[in-house]
Image (spheres, coloured by chain):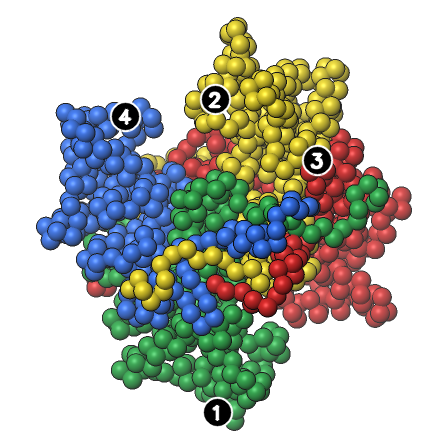
Chain colours: A red, B yellow, C green, D blue
C-alpha cells in the first residue's frame, strides 16, 4: 500500500503524531497531566463526579455543582433485571464472558430508545430556552409542537409505564431547587421542565410527571452539558447497575441463561415444517 | 417449541418469575429499593463510590473506605489515546456511532491483557495472604513461584514500559498508608505489595516499582473486593476516559478515522498479487 | 416486583410464550425447522448465500439470484488494516479478547458512516425508482436534490478517496448485467446507478465512479432487499475480514497493540500541566 | 508525549508502516489483492466458504473441501430466540440500535460457554490424535481423562439438553463420511468423535450423541483449522441467525423489549426496603 512519496519524512511523522491529538491528557515519562492538572494533585483531592466533569468539560467544577452531578449519577444506576441492558449483562456472563465483555455488550444497547431519552429531552429543553430567548409568546407550546413535528408524538422525559410517580424524580428536583436557591444553577431548566409537565397535563387531562430522564435532563442542562452528554453521563451511571448484576450472575454460576426458563416455550409463527418445502 | 406439559401453570409462572431473581434492586410502582434502601434516601446523601460499593457488596461503606475507593476510581480514568480502549472509542465515533456504541466497543476490550492486570495482581496478593496464614517460611517468594508456574514469568502490577515511576502509584500508596494508620484498612496488602516489589528488585537487580494496577489491587484487596471486581472497578474508572475521548472526537467530526493517517501506508507481507494464482 | 394479579395464569404463560415469537425457526426435541424446511434437508443442499436469503426473506432464492448475492458477499470482505473495523479487531485481540469479543467490538462500529453507505445508497436508488414510477421529468436529478436536502451534499456510493476506479465495482456490475440479460433481475437499479454516475460526472466535470457501496446497493436492490439489509449483508461480508485479521493478530501475539508504535508520540493540545491549576 | 528522539525519521516511518503489517490483503490505487489473488478474479468465481477459507488459511481450498465447510456454516445459523445471542440481538434492536450494534452486542457473547464448545471439542480431538500418534494403549480414554483433569467433568460436543438426537449432527456426519470415502478428508477425526461417543455411552450407560458442536468440530478438524477457528467459524454461521432475528424484531417495532412481559414480575430476594437501613 503506497503512500504519496512527495511528502517529506518529518512532515509525515508530524501528521502521524497529530493524528491522535488530544487536549485531555498529557503523558511524559513519570508525568500524567489531566487537562493541565498533575494526576497526583487530583487523586484523593477530587471525587469521581468532579473527575468526570473535568475530563468532559475541561474545567474544574465547584463543589456544589459536582454534588448535583453526583446525585444524578447515583439516581440512575439500576432499574431492575427486566431492563434490556441489565438482562443482557446477566446473560453475557452466563455465556462465559468476563466482566468487561458483559459490560461491553450491555452498555452498547443504551441507544436512542433505551438510553437516549435524556438526550432527547435536553434537546427539547434547549429548544424551549432558545424560543424563550427569542421572546415568542408560548415558548413551551411552540417547542412541543416543533419537537413533535420532527420526532413524533412521544415527549421524552415525562410519564412512566410502571411508576405512577417516579421516586427518583421528586428527590432530584428538590436538589435542583436547593441548588437554584443557593445560586449554584439558574433554575431555568427546572422551570422549563415543570412548564412542559403542566402543558402535557393540560393537554391530556391527567398528570404525566417528569421521570428520571426528564429530571436528569434538567440537571445536566442546568450544569451546562451538551445533550449528547446526557446520554454519556447516563452510561456512567447505568454501568454501575450493569456491573453489579453481571457480578451477581457470575456468583450464581448458571451456564447459557436464556431470557426465559425452559418450561416456557417460545411461539413459532412461521410455516409448518415439512409443508413449505 | 413445546414445554413439558406436566408442570402446573402456577409453577411455571413461579419458575419464570424466579428466572430473573436478584438481591440488588426491588421495584414496585412508585418504589425503588437498592439493597434495602429507598432510592430517595440515597440520592443526594451518598456519593458515586458509595453507590458502587453498595451495589456490588450489598452493604454501605464507611466514609473513609468510600474515599479510598474513590481515589482509586479517579486515578485510572485515562492513559492517553494510544491505549487501545481509547483509540477504539475515538475510531468508533468517527464511524458514526453514538456514545453508547463507542463506549461499548471500547469497554469490551478491557480484557485479560488490557484490563485484567489488576485482577491478576489481586490473585497474587491473595495467594501471599493465604500462604502467610499458613505460616510458610517465605510466603512472598513461594507465592511468586506458584503464580509464575501457573501464569508465566510476568508479574502483573509491577514495572511500566513507559513510566520509570508511575505518579499515580506513589500518591495512592500514601493514601493507603494513611487509611491503615487510621485503622480504616489493615495495611496487610500494602505490606504484601511492597514485599513483592522488594523481592522483584532483589531478583532483577533493578527497581521495578508498583504500577497503577499493582497499587489499585492493593486498595481493592484492602477494601475486601474479590479479584474479578478489580477488573470491574477498573471498567467504571476507564469508562470516564473512554467517554471523554469519544466526546472530544465527536466534536472534531472526522469521518472513518483509521489508526494512521493516509500518508503512512501499511506493509503488505503476503504473496504478490497475480503471481500466487 | 408485583404483576397485575388479575390476569389468569394461563394467559400470563401465553403472554410469556408469545413474548419471544418468531417466524424464522421452529424447534422441537429432535426437530429443527428453518422457515418451514427441516434443517437436515438444507445442510449440504444449499449454500451460505441461500441460507442467508432464506433466513432474512423467508423464501428460497433461485440459484442465479443466490450466486449474485454471493458475489456481493465475497467482494466486500476486507479493505485492509487501516479500516477502523479491522484495526479494532486486531487491537482487541492484543488486549486478550477471544475471537468473539474481537469480532463483537469490530462489527459494532460498522455504523452509519463506516458501514451504512450501502444502506443510504439503496434509499437513494429507491427514491429514484419511486420518482420514475410517478413519471417525473428528471427522476435522477430530482432524487439527488431531495436526498441532499435531507442528508447533505455527499452522495453515498460514488467516488473513493483511495481508488480512482474500484476494481470490485466493475466486476460486480458486469455480473449484474449478465443477470439482467438472463432475466434473473430487472436491471432497473443498475440503470439508476449508472444514471446517477452520469449525473454526478456532468455536475462535477470529472468521473466519480460507482464504488463498492454503490454497486452492492445495486445488487441488493435488484434482489429485493430492504435498505437496512444492505448494511446487514455487509456485516456478514466484512465479518470475514474482521475474523481473518483478528486471527492473524492472534498468531502474531503482541500485547496491548495501540494504533501507533511507541516511537510516534501523540500530540497534546491542551493546557500545560502545572500551570492551569 | 515525547518519543525517543534518537531514532531517525525514516526508521520511525518504517516502524509505523510495519505496525499494521498483514499478509492478507494488498491494496494499491485501483488494485486489491487477497492473499495474492486480484479481487476481480475472485468475485463471481469463488463462493463465500472458499473466501472464508482463503482469508483464514491463506490458500484456495478444493471444491469438495469448501462444500464441507459450507455445510457446517449452514448448519449452525440459528437455534431459536431463547439462545442468549439471539435474544440479545432482538432486545438490542428494541433499544434503538442499528443492525451493526445488535449484531455486535450479540456476537460478543459467543464466549467460552455459548460459542466455545466447538473450540474445546477440537482441543479434545487433537489431544486424542496426538495420543494416537504416540501409540498409547487407549488414546480416547486417556484423552478424556487428561481433558477432564484440566477442564472439569463436562465433555464438550456430546449430548444436548433439549434434543435427544440433534438432527444437524447425523446429516453433517454423513457428509463427513462421504468426504472421507472420496478422499477429501482423512476421516480420522470422525473416527475419534465416534470413539468418544462410544466411550461416553459405556461410561454412563446411556447414549450421549454427538451434538452440533461435536460434529462441526469433527469437520473443522478434518479440514485443518485450528481450534480457535472452530469458534471463529461458528461466529460467521450464527451471525446469520443473529441478523435475521434482529431484522425480524426491527420489523415488529417494539420499544425496550425486556426478557419477559410485564405480566411476569421478577423475584426480589434481598433485604426488605426500609428495614435494612
Q: Are marks 2 and 4 on the same chain?
A: no
Q: Are marks 3 and 1 on the same chain?
A: no
Q: Which residue is mark 1?
A: C135
Which of the two residues, D119 or C255, is positioned nearer the viewer here? C255
Q: Which residue is mark 4?
A: D146
Query: What percent of the width, then of the height, locates residue B161?
Result: 60, 36
- When the figure is inspected, residue B192 is found, relative to residue A48, above or below; the finding is above
Q: Which residue is mark 2?
A: B147
Which chain contains the residue that carries disc 4? D
Q: Quadrant of the C terminus of chain C?
A: top right
In space, the residues marked 1 and 2 are separated at their CA atoms by 76 Å
In space, the residues marked 3 and 4 are separated at their CA atoms by 48 Å
Residue appearing at x 35%, y 56% in the figure? D55
Residue appearing at x 61%, y 54% in the figure? D9
Which chain contains the residue that carries disc 3? A
Which of the two residues, D27 or C2, is positioned nearer the viewer here? D27
Which chain contains the residue that carries disc 2? B
Question: What number of labels is visible?
Answer: 4
Horizontal side of A273 relative to B134 (left or right) equals left
Quarter of the view holding residue A64: top right
Q: Is residue A253 visible?
A: yes
Horizontal side of A163 relative to D99 (left or right) equals right
Horizontal side of D91 relative to D40 (left or right) equals right
Q: Which residue is mark 3?
A: A30
- When the figure is inspected, residue B120 is found, relative to residue B111, above or below; the finding is above
Query: What percent of the width, then of the height, locates residue B130?
Result: 52, 13
In space, the residues marked 3 and 1 are separated at their CA atoms by 70 Å
Q: Closer to the camera: disc 1 or disc 2? A: 2
In space, the residues marked 2 and 4 are separated at their CA atoms by 22 Å
Which of the two residues, A269 or D210, is positioned nearer the viewer here? D210
Query: What percent of the width, then of the height, locates residue C124?
Result: 51, 77
Amino acid at each position: 500500500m503506497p503512500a504519496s512519496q512527495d511528502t517529506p519524512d518529518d512532515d509525515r511523522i508530524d501528521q502521524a503524531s497529530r493524528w491522535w491529538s488530544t487536549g485531555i491528557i498529557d503523558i511524559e515519562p513519570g508525568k500524567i497531566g489531566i487537562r493541565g492538572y498533575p494526576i497526583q494533585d487530583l487523586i484523593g483531592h477530587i471525587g469521581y463526579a468532579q473527575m468526570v466533569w473535568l475530563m468532559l468539560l475541561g474545567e474544574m467544577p465547584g463543589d456544589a455543582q459536582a454534588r448535583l452531578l453526583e446525585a444524578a449519577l447515583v439516581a440512575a444506576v439500576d432499574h431492575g433485571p427486566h431492563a434490556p441492558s441489565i438482562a443482557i449483562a446477566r446473560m453475557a456472563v452466563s455465556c462465559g464472558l468476563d466482566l468487561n465483555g458483559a459490560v461491553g455488550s450491555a452498555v452498547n444497547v443504551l441507544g436512542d430508545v433505551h438510553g437516549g431519552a435524556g438526550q432527547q429531552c435536553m434537546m427539547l429543553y434547549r429548544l424551549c430556552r432558545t424560543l424563550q430567548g427569542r421572546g415568542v409568546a408560548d415558548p413551551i407550546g411552540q417547542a412541543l409542537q416543533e419537537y413533535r413535528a420532527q420526532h413524533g408524538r412521544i415527549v421524552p422525559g415525562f410519564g412512566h409505564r410502571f411508576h405512577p410517580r417516579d421516586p427518583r424524580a421528586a428527590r432530584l428536583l428538590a436538589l435542583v431547587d436547593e441548588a437554584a436557591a443557593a445560586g449554584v444553577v439558574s433554575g431555568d431548566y427546572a422551570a422549563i421542565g415543570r412548564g412542559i409537565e403542566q402543558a402535557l397535563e393540560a393537554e391530556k387531562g391527567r398528570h404525566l410527571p417528569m421521570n428520571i430522564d426528564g429530571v436528569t435532563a434538567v440537571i445536566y442542562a442546568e450544569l451546562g452539558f451538551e445533550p449528547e452528554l446526557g446520554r454519556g453521563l447516563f452510561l456512567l451511571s447505568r454501568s454501575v447497575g450493569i456491573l453489579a448484576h453481571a457480578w451477581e450472575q457470575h456468583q450464581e454460576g448458571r451456564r447459557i441463561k436464556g431470557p426465559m426458563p425452559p418450561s416456557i416455550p417460545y411461539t413459532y409463527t412461521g410455516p409448518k415444517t415439512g409443508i413449505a418445502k
